[in-house]
Image (cartoon, rainbow, N blue to C red):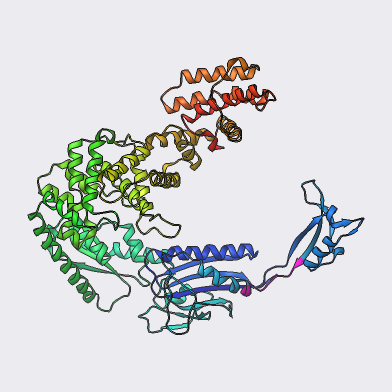
Amino acid sequence: MSDLKPLLIEIGVEEIPAGVAPRMGSALQAALVKLFNDANLDVSDLRLGVTPRRLLIHVAACPTMQADSEQVIWGPPENIALKDGEPSKAAEGFARKSGLSVSDFEFTDKGDGKAKYMKAVITVKGRKTIDIIAEAMPAILRGLPSPKQMQWQDGESRGDSFIRPIRWIVARLGDDVLDFSFAGIQAGKQSYAHRMCKDAKGDISVTDPFAWLEERMVIADRDARKASIVQGLNNAAKAVGVALVEDDALVEEVTDLTEWPHVITGKYEEKFLALPIEVSRIELKHHQRCFSTKDKDGNTSNVFFAVANIKSNDPAMVAHGNERVVNARLADAMFFFERDPKESLESRVEKLSEIVFQDGLGMVGDQVRRLRGFVLDNADKLGVDANDTQRAAYLCKSDLTTGLVGEFPELQGYMGGIYAEMDGENKEVAEAISQHYAPAGADDDLPTSSIAKAIAVVERADKLLGYFHLGKIPTASADPFALRRAAIGLVRLLADETNPVDMTLQEVLQEASKQWNQQRVTITISDETQAAVLSFIHERFLGLSDGFDVTKPACDAALGANLALPLHKHLQVARLLTGFADSEAGQAVAAANKRIANILKKAGDVSSDIDESLLVEDVEKALFSALQKAESNFPDDAEAQLQVLAGLREPVDAFFDGVMVMADDDAIKVNRLALLSRLRGLFLRLADVSRLA
C-alpha cells in the first residue's frame, strides 16, 4: 500500500484578466484529475484555488507511488505466428520487440471468435507519483485555455508562453519537490503573499495552503472570496440605509480582481442624479467597477460601493479618491447631456458617413441605409409598421455621433432612445432605438419592442454577411468581431415566438445580401458566403438546443426538412421530435428512416415515379396505399403531421420484413426505390427523422 501525502501545485503569475483565471483553474483541475485517473492514482479531497495572481490545486491525500499493474500484450494471429507448428520469424520478431520471448506468450481467443492470437500478461512496475506529475505538468500548463498568450524576457530566455508572466511555481508532494520547470521558473516550495503583506514570501504549508495564504491576506478559495464580497456589500448597504442594485456580473468581475476584498462606501454629488439612470450606473460599473444603489423609495441613490483589494487604515481617504474620480466623470457626462440635444438625431445621420463600419465594408451610414431598405421591403414579414420601423432604422445609429456616447460607448442605443424622445419622436421609435442592440449576450433579455427586434435581426444578418465576405470567420480560439455572439443573438431573435418573425433564415440572409448588392458601395455578397453564414448559424442553433429544452438531434432533424420554415416553427418541430424520439414508435420510425436514407444514398439518383403495375407484393401495395392516403390528407399543423407520419410505422416495418428492396428484377427494384424515395420525401416535409436514430 502506497503512502499518502498532501499534494500542492501553485502557479504564481502577474494579474490575470477578470474572467480568465476561473476558466484556467477549472482546466488545470480537469487536466490533473484526468492524469490521476489515467495513472490509477486514487486521490481524495481535491480543492481548487483561484485568484488574480495564482492558480492552486491542493490534494489532501495523494499516493506517493503508482500501484503495479498488469498489461496484456496481443501479438499476431496463430496462422501467422506459427509455421509448421513452430514460431515464425514474425512471432519471434514481435516477442523481441516486446522485450519478451516467444515462450512468454500463449495462444488465446480475443473474444471475437475469429482466431487465436499471441497473448502475454506482464506486470508493469508502478512509478513515483512525483515523476508522473512532474513529467506531465509542462504540457498541462501549455494547454490551459486563455484568450492570448504572451512571452516575456526579464532574465534568461524563455521558450514557453502563458497568459501573464509566471513569477513562481510551487509543486510539492509532502516534503518532496516535483522536479520540473516552466517558462524559466523552477518548481519549489516558496509562495508569495498579498502584495501589501509585510510577510511577503515563504514556504507555503503543504497541508493547509488556504489557511497559510489567508494569514497573509489572500482568500484563495474563489467561492469564499465571492461570498465575502456579497456579505460586505449587503452589510455596507444596510449600514447607510440603501438597497444594492444587484449585478451578478460585476460581483464575478471584482471577485477576479481581488485577493483580499473590502467594501468602501462613497457618494457622488446629488446634482448628477438629474442624469438618465443608466449614465451613473454605467460610469460606476464599467469605469470604476463600483456598485450602484437605490434609496428606500426605489429611486437612484448617489451612494455607491467600491471593492478594494486591501483593508485600508483610512477607508475615508480611499472613498474620497473614488468619489473624486466618479464626480469628474459624471461632470463630463452632464456636460455632454446638456449639449448633445442641441443637435437632433436626424441632423446627425449625415455624420454616420464619416464613421467606419469596418475596413473593407464601408461606413456606418451605408449600414443604416441597408437596415432601412431591408425593413421597408419586408415590414409585413417582420410583423412591424413600415413607417415607424424605417424611421427607427434611420435614426438608430445617430447617437454614435454624440459626445455622451463618445465618452461612454456602453450607452449607445440607450441614449439614442432618450435623445429620440427629446427630439419628439414617437414612443415606438424611441423604444426601438433604445432596445435594438439587445440581446448583447447569450443570457440577455430579448427586446420587448417588435420594431427593435426587427432591426436587431437585420443588423446581425448584415454583420455576419459582411465579415464572412472578408474572411474574418471565427476560429476555435479566436472570435475578435464577436460573430458567434451575433449569430446566437440572431437565433434567439428568430426562435422567439413573441411577435414572431415569419421569415425563414434563408430569406433573412437573401434579403440582407440584396441590400449589400444593391448598394454597390463596397462589396457583393456571393451565394457561397450566404451558405457559409447559414451553416454557421445552424451550428449555433444546435449549440443552443439545451437552452431551448430540446435535444440536439431533434434540432438537427427539424433543420433537415426539405421545406425551410421560420426558425420559431423549426423549434416547434424540434420540441415535438424531442418527446417523440424517446417513444417506442419514435425509435422505430427513426430507425426505418435511417435505413431508407442509407438505401437511397447508395442507390444514387432515384426517381419518385411509381408504377403501380410493378407493385407485386401485398406489403408494398399496402405501403403505397398508406402513403397515398397520407399525402392526400397531409395536414398543415406540425403535431398532426407527426401523427400521420407515425401512423406509417406498421406498413413500413411490414414492407422491410416482406420484400427485398434490391430485387433481382431491375424494374421491380427501381420501383421499390421510387416508393422509398417518395416516402422519404413525405417525411422530409416535416423533418429528417433519420437524424434521430
Residue 676, relative to residue 233: is it above or below?
Answer: above
Residue 374, relative to residue 645: is it above or below?
Answer: below
On whether residue 128 falls in the magenta region, the answer is yes
The answer to whether residue 297 is visible is no
Specify the quadrant that holds the N terminus.
Answer: bottom right
**Which residue: 20% across, 47% down?**
433
Figure label count: 0
Q: What percent of the width, then of the height, locates residue 61?
A: 59, 69
Q: Nearer the viewer, residue 67 or 590?
A: 590
Q: What percent of the width, then of the height, locates residue 512?
A: 30, 43
Q: What percent of the width, then of the height, locates residue 500?
A: 31, 36
Q: What percent of the width, then of the height, locates residue 361?
A: 29, 54
| Magenta residues (range) | 123-131
Q: In screen coordinates, is 282 left or right of 472?
A: left
Outermost left residue: 342
Q: In screen coordinates, is 551 left or right of 364?
A: right
Q: In screen coordinates, is 226 left or right of 610?
A: left
Q: Nearer the viewer, residue 269 or 628?
A: 628
Outermost front residue: 520
